[in-house]
Image: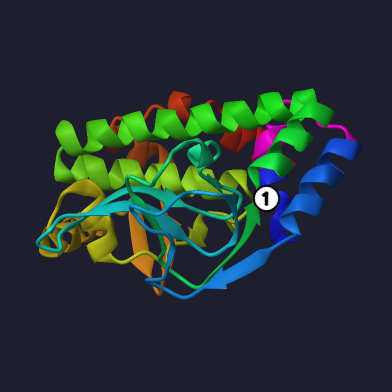
Amino acid sequence: MSEVRLLRKLRAFTPLSDESEQAVMALAAQRVRTGAPDDDIISEGDEPKTIHLMLDGWACRYKTLEDGRRQILGFFIPGDLADLHVYILNEMDHSIGALTPIRYASITPKEFEVLGDGHPRLLRALWWESLLTASIQREWLVNVGQRSALEAVAHLCCELYLRLRGVALCDGSECPFPITQSDLGDALGLTQPHVSRTLRELSAAKLLTLKRKRLIVHDLEGLQRLAGFNPNYLHHTYDAAASR
């Protein structure tokens, strides 16, 4: 079941009791909502009242400029929380929108507090998950600020492949990759034609192929070398989680 995917990540940080896992599963089954591509889960300026747990599909964190240009600030895949402590804010300073058909659970602050009070080890794991999100955000900043287009596209593909593998969404060297070239451009500060040329170059080098919304990684080590990819910022979640 897709609701288990958050637990796969948390188990990579610490062993969880059966009671803690059941508590997470119970929350994931409440107030389940769906959305269509381009729907906002929450928009900039809204008052955040719940935590959103991604169950199925992909979403993104983004900001839109007055002239319509969009900057994607993060991708959410099944098992991600978007965002764990956002309800502390008076209003959203960014939007979270669906990129594909999605299914997600809305968790109230009170439910989260009760969960933490009753399961301190689980609470610690959830804090770790929040810090992991911040670590990924820092690496994205380096993508936009310092890496070449070839390095940045390769780096993001490495990251998403390993994150998907960590929640058991890879089939060998393949994984779902429903985001468009425009989405990649908005995440990396590149034009869609530039992204297209870069992907062709990576394909010609026999490192990866994007086909029918699937990413096929032909040479993960080679792709990591090209990108200068050091997986330490993912804190080894992809190894521990993938082994379960």
- Residue located beneath label 1 in the image: 5
State whether residue 178 is above or below residue 190. Answer: below
Residue 202: x percent and y percent? 25, 53
State whether residue 99 is above or below residue 157. Answer: below
Q: Which residue is pictured at 44% across the width and 26% down the height?
A: 233
Residue 170 versus residue 93: which sits nearer the camera?
93
Q: Quadrant of residue 64?
A: bottom left
Residue 218 visible in the snapshot: yes
Please state, as top left, top right, bottom left or bottom right, where the C terminus lies in the image.
Answer: top right
Q: Quadrant of residue 198?
A: bottom left
Please state, as top left, top right, bottom left or bottom right, where the N terminus lies in the image.
Answer: bottom right
Q: On the picture, is 17 further left or further right than 149?
A: right
| Magenta segment | 8-17
Determine whether the residue tagged by mark 1 lies in a helix, strand or loop: helix
Residue 71 versus residue 90: which sits nearer the camera?
90
State whether residue 43 is above or below residue 127. Answer: below
Residue 70: x percent and y percent? 21, 57
Q: On the picture, is 190 further left or further right than 19?
A: left
State whether residue 29 is above or below residue 102. Answer: above
Residue 15 visible in the snapshot: no
Q: What coloring was used for the rendering?
A: rainbow
Residue 207: x percent and y percent? 33, 51
In the rendered structure, does residue 12 fall within the stretch colored magenta? yes
Q: Which residue is pictured at 84% across the width and 30% down the height?
A: 118
Q: Which residue is pictured at 57% across the width and 71% down the height?
A: 34
Assign the magenta stretch its main secondary structure: loop
The type of residue carrying mark 1 is Arg
